[in-house]
Image (spheres, helix red, strand yellow):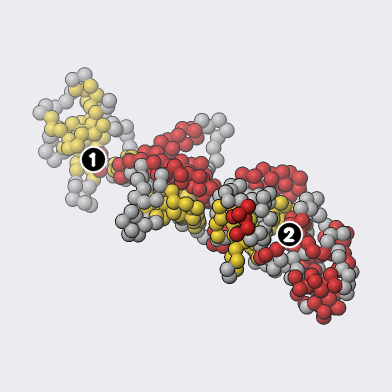
Amino acid sequence: MLWLCLHLPQFSLEALGDASASQVVTGRRGARRWVIAGAADRIAPGTDWGTVQVLHPDLRAAERKPRAERETMQALAAWAWRYGSELVWEITESELDFGLPCALLWVEIGASLKLYGGLEALLAHLDAGFAETGHVGSLAVAPTLEAAALFARIGLAEPVIEREQLPAVLDALPLASLMLTPRTLEALKAIGLSRIGELLALPAAALGKRHGAQLVTFLDRLLGRRPDVRPRWRPPAKFQRRIDLLGEVEYTEGLLFPLQRMTRELGNFLKARDTGLQVFRLTLLHGRASGGRLQADTVLDLRLATSARDPERLLRVLREQLSCTPLPAPVRSLRLNAEQFIEPATGQRDLFDATRGDDEAWSQLVEKLVARLGAEAVTSLGLIADHRPERSWRTRACDAPPAEVARVTAPPRPIWLIDPPKPLSTTPKALAAAERLEGGWWDGGDVLRDYYHADLHGGRFWVFQDRLTSAWFLQGIWA
């Protein structure tokens, strides 16, 4: 196996949705508060927050949010799913470095090398895609999870392909680069060890007896002598994403940036599951209104004209809906949910088929109208399996799946129908061939009619004679 590991040093800050230079994330243990991420060029991680406020009063602090980190990592894993079907991620707190969180994401890329045309091409493709995620990190490639994580943390970018190469690469690395407990590191340094190679040269039995079996197990996983049984990640059954805004937002324009991130993550989720959606929900969570009472959430149910998974299309629908939605109170959080998935409308087409662009333009128009006017105000016509003209059609939602509408084979009929049919005082002239319709006995609307094409007053009309009464009626006009 060949593992690619992404080390994300600013992940706690990125999970909050604001990676600006004036924002930092702090950790707290008891009464003490210190910086754990952000402004790395100005403030060293572990610096006391009180000291930072004195030296840099322009910096803003936010508490670390583990839930946001987990959801952000789930979204990043969905993006990385395209590079391998085995994924592992961890967010741990090191016992060193003031308990700083360590975010790692592994992807098994050995089975994908042929698909991407080799390791170099895969890494180039991944670098380009990772830059669009908005995260900052370093990556490394190694045959084991532990080795890939170690190389990513220390910035060893040269890929290590074979397991037999690991001892030689690890030999000169400092012992402190291993994620061991402070007590174990101090004990190993006390006996004169400074390099990983020196540690690997010691007998495993003696190490286990003196420093515990966990150290031996860790070294075996590092070298690939023991399988790493950490659970693999799988795409969840539904998409749930929440972003807590750093401040209250009073205008919908201020929501577009976090929504862009959320729709991009939703698009990655849909691609990981190889599916699409037609309905999803956005919830705006408010604080308290001006009177002090708690404001109810604003819920927006979005529906697309056809199934899709393009983030830009999802964002466009959200933008249109928000543009005509007044905010009853400032927004503090956003929540995006999607639970119903269907196959995306990306079927095989002919090489010279030029209708795809027309279909997409029509879908965009329908989605814009529905978002601005409401689903009940935008309808289309559908056919019903009934030969009676007045009952062979119905209005339906523009986004209803075509499969819900039955197709009927019938002779040519005018689209402009007169309801109810208009009685004629005389028999029309110049009648064409008749079309006889009988039906409706099952619902009490039995009809027996002979339909003709007729010329009346210089126009082309569709008339019929009732066979029960012999009366003539006008029912359609060819315009």
Question: Which of 451 and 193 lies nearest the eye of the viewer?
Answer: 193
Query: Residue under circle 1?
Result: 390
Return the disc, 2 or 1, that comes first in the chain's sequence.
2
Q: Does residue 146 appear to the left or right of 263 in the view shown?
A: right
The picture quadrant where one finds residue 45 is: bottom right
Question: Which of 431 and 52 lies nearest the eye of the viewer?
Answer: 52
The picture quadrant where one finds residue 253 is: top left
Q: Where residue 138 sits in the image (x, y, percent)?
A: 71, 51
Q: Does residue 100 appear to the left or right of 199 in the view shown?
A: left
Q: Where residue 28 sits in the image (x, y, percent)?
A: 59, 65
Please report the residue visible at 69 percent of the width from the left and 45 percent of the height from the top: 127
Q: Amino acid at mark 2?
A: Ala
Q: CA distance from mark 2 to mark 1?
A: 70 Å
Please report the residue visible at 30 percent of the width from the left and 42 percent of the height from the top: 377
Q: Where residue 334 sits in the image (x, y, percent)?
A: 45, 53
Circle nearer the viewer, 2 or 1: 2
Q: Where residue 326 sits in the image (x, y, percent)?
A: 35, 45
Indicate which disc residue 149 carries.
Answer: 2
Judged from the image, the secondary structure of the residue bearing numbered disc 1 is helix
Q: Which quarter of the image is occupied by the C terminus?
A: top left
For the question of whether residue 234 can be seen, the reply is: no
